[in-house]
Amino acid sequence: MYVFLLHLIESENQWLKIYFPMVFIFPPLLSKKLQPLWLLLVMYFCAFAVASSPNHDAAAASPEIASVASEANALLKWKASLDNHSQASLSSWTGNNPCNWLGISCDDTSSVSTINLTRAGLRGMLHSLNFSLLPNILTLNMSYNTLSGSIPPQIGSLSNLSTLDLSTNKLSGSIPNTIGNLSKLKYLNLSANGLSGSIPNEVGNLLSLLTFDIYTNNLSGSIPPSLGNLPRLESIHLFSNKLSGPIPASLGNLSRLTMLSLSSNQLTGSIPPHIGNLSNAKVICFIGNELSGEIPIEMEKLTGLECLQLADNNFIGQIPQNICLGGNMKFFTAGNNNFTGPIPESLKNCHSLKRLRLQQNHLTGDITNFFDVLPNLNYIDLSENNFHGNLSPRWGKFRSLTSLMIANNKLSGVIPPELGGAAQLQVLDLSSNHLTGSIPQDLCNLTLLFDLSISNNNLSGNVPMEIESLHELKYLELGSNNLTGSIRKQLGTLHNLLKMNLSQNKFEGSIPFELGNLQYLSSLDLSENMLSGTLPPTLGEIKGLETLNLSHNSLSGGLSSLNDMRSLTSFDISYNQFEGPVPNNQIFHNVTIEALRNNKGLCGNVTGLEPCPTFSGKYHNNMKRRVLIAVLPLTVAILMLALFVLGVFYHLCRTSTEEQDETTILRSSSVFPIWDFGGKITFENIIEGTEYFDDKHLIGVGGQGCVYKATLPTGEVVAVKKLHSVSNGEIPNMKAFKSEIQTLTEIRHRNIVKLFGFCSHSQYSFLVCEFLEKGDLNKILKNDEQAIAFDWKKRVNVVKGVADALCYMHHDCSPPIVHRDISSKNVLLDSEYVAHVSDFGTAKFLNHNSSNWTSFAGTFGYAAPG
Ligand SMILES: *[C@@H]1O[C@H](CO)[C@@H](O)[C@H](O)[C@H]1NC(C)=O
Ligand SMILES: *[C@@H]1O[C@H](CO)[C@@H](O)[C@H](O)[C@H]1NC(C)=O
Ligand SMILES: *[C@@H]1O[C@H](CO)[C@@H](O)[C@H](O)[C@H]1NC(C)=O
Ligand SMILES: *[C@@H]1O[C@H](CO)[C@@H](O)[C@H](O)[C@H]1NC(C)=O
Ligand SMILES: *[C@@H]1O[C@H](CO)[C@@H](O)[C@H](O)[C@H]1NC(C)=O
């Protein structure tokens, strides 16, 4: 009974609403005896009320309740067709009263009037939604979901619909022509989908339509002229489709239209003069079509226009002279057409103007003092026209100007220093004109500038030193001028630079090493200047450099600074004096001879270059050794003995001559070339490479001395072991020093550190060895991260390598060599984790018959015991 009562109270029956509450209101006021009587009385009236109502069978016959139930069913059926995730986001959709479900609102009659499921994460199709069961919806908004499939034709049954927004989904197929049945539709938005086919002519029946947004789809065919029938239409957005054919003249009848955007389509023909009747138009965009012909003079009637975009078409003739007659024009673009004649006169003092793009036309005239000071002008591009005259000092008074582009014209005269007053300027492009004089220092006041392009003029003098105040600079284009002097080291402070082009000038001197600070630089062009000297080693610190052109200069030395440049894609060092090996990294493997030709002595693995001389036939020796061990194990002992005997004689002979050489060297106390590298490494190379043994190149400290990393101009990185210097120029451990040299120079083995040479000088004595990237084993084992990367397989290989090295020293060398200090500090690893035994300072030649092998050879504090 209570359920029945509840049901009643929900019903629409007016009488019930009056009588039923009496059940609860009066009983407390009545005596207990009278209460049942009261209840009976009320029930009687209730029954009367139900009986007198036209739909007394409330549960089944009320059309409202029936429709609520069927609306709920239609929605639930659709929900079931969506994917699980969507169903989860519609979790409130249960029961049979949709009015309080997520995104649903009902009208007074409890019928669904709004479905607003924008950004609800829905994925599925619209087909299972039975629109005919939802006759009362006014708003259907399912924008920003992932609905796919086509728009069902049944959508035409939503005869009360006023807003349809299915924008930003993945809908495909064509727009059903039943859309024309939505006679009450005001807002139509199907933009940002994948709809194709043509726009149905039936849209001409949408007589209530205010906005028509179908931009960014794949719609083709022509714009239906019937659109011109919609008297209330205020905005049309059809941009970014594939619409073709002409702009219908009928659009001129849309007297309420304020926005017409047809950009980025394939429309042809000329602009119908009727467009001039769109007296309320504020925005008209025709960018990026194939429109042609002249701009109809009727367009001048559109005095309310704030934005007219004609760019990227094939228009010819003059730009209408009175385009800013109404004084409202803010954005006018006519770039990339075939316009001729002068800039429209009305733009001269168009104070509302914010953006003006007239680039890539055939416009003419003297622009020296054409523009008054336009306080709102923010962006102006007049590039690629035939303008002449000077650059007016007045430009410096344009307070809002951020971009001034007049490239590729016939401007002459100087860059006025007053230009430095346009404090908001970010882009200044005056390239390819006939400007003369120097770069005014005042230009460096433009601290917001990020693009300074003045290449291809006749500018002379040097770059002002004050250029360092342009911290925001990303693009510096100074190429093809007559600039002189040295490359300013201040350029190295412009940390944001991405591109620097100083090519085809008369810059001289060397490349300042400060350029190495330009961490973000991706393109550096210094070609065709008169630069000399070697490449600063810091150049290699520009890790992201992609394009490097140093061609046609007089640069010399090696290319080692380029060793670490892993991101280079374009590279040209032709016509210089470079020599030595071409860096052995991936990039240089693909380099062609064109990029390297006409240098002094480059070598390397590039077709057209000589291969670089190798250091030894160590690989060959190894192979030979293996063959011997494998094929003739029995003869090894005999051979060893023979070799040993020979070796003893050989050694005895040679030590004497060598010792003689060394003493000469040491006595003369001057600088000696280091052998290997074809004798090309000099004392100066080492001093330069380590910047006088600067601590920043220090990579290790040993008992004997410090180890530095040095980059040689020949393109090699080497380790330099400097013996502890002493004031009197004497080397206390000269004996060990010589021992190390003697030992190392005789060893050529894959697992033994290569010695390239040594140098003895009154100030410095040092060894030059192979540089090994990973450093010593001790260091790696102490570093958790590196120790993990150094897995067991690698460790076993290292042990094998050390064993190989020792085996070689003990058995294959003649006389045998005992290292006597094998410790983790003396095992160095290269990038492939191959072990190289180093530090033979304590090693000593050991004759088989000698008994003194335990004697201590050096004066070191770190020799391993025993
Ligand atoms: C659309 O209206 C036409 C009449 O103009 C009618 O024949 C058609 O059935 C309607 N379509 C829908 C889906 O309501
Ligand atoms: C679609 O059009 C409606 C009505 O003009 C508008 O309110 C809505 O912002 C539009 N949606 C998009 C994505 O442009
Ligand atoms: C503009 O509307 C008028 C009637 O309002 C009509 O006669 C004319 O044909 C329409 N113009 C175009 C170009 O459709
Ligand atoms: C470059 O400048 C020098 C003087 O610095 C001048 O003699 C020469 O004519 C100039 N060249 C060009 C092409 O302007
Ligand atoms: C390097 O510059 C020269 C002269 O400026 C030019 O001829 C050459 O094509 C450039 N090289 C590359 C790879 O761009």
Image (tube, rainbow, N blue to C red):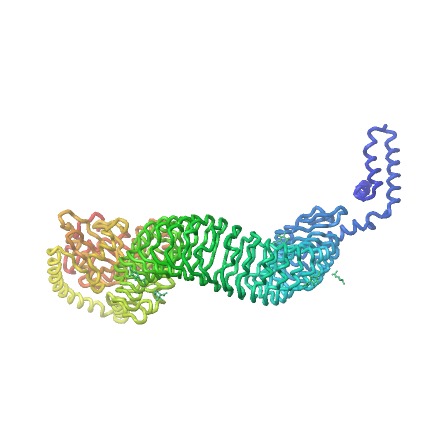
The percent position of residue 198, horizontal first and vertical second, equals 64, 65
Relative side of 556 to 353, left or right: left
Question: Is 544 or 323 nearer to us in this picture?
Answer: 323
Q: Residue at 18% x, 67% y: name it.
A: 643
The percent position of residue 669, horizontal first and vertical second, equals 13, 55
Q: Quadrant of residue 678?
A: bottom left
Q: Where's ligand 3: which quadrant?
A: bottom right
Question: Is 14 or 849 nearer to us in this picture?
Answer: 14
Question: Is 691 or 443 nearer to us in this picture?
Answer: 443
Q: Residue at 15% x, 47% y: name it.
A: 727
Question: Is 28 or 460 nearer to us in this picture?
Answer: 460
Residue 413 appears in view: yes
135 over 622 or under it: above or below = above
Q: Residue at 76% x, 53% y: name it.
A: 70
Circle count: 0
The image quadrant where one finds the N terminus is top right
The percent position of residue 144, horizontal first and vertical second, equals 61, 54
The percent position of residue 463, horizontal first and vertical second, equals 33, 54
Residue 626 appears in view: no
Q: Quadrant of residue 143?
A: bottom right
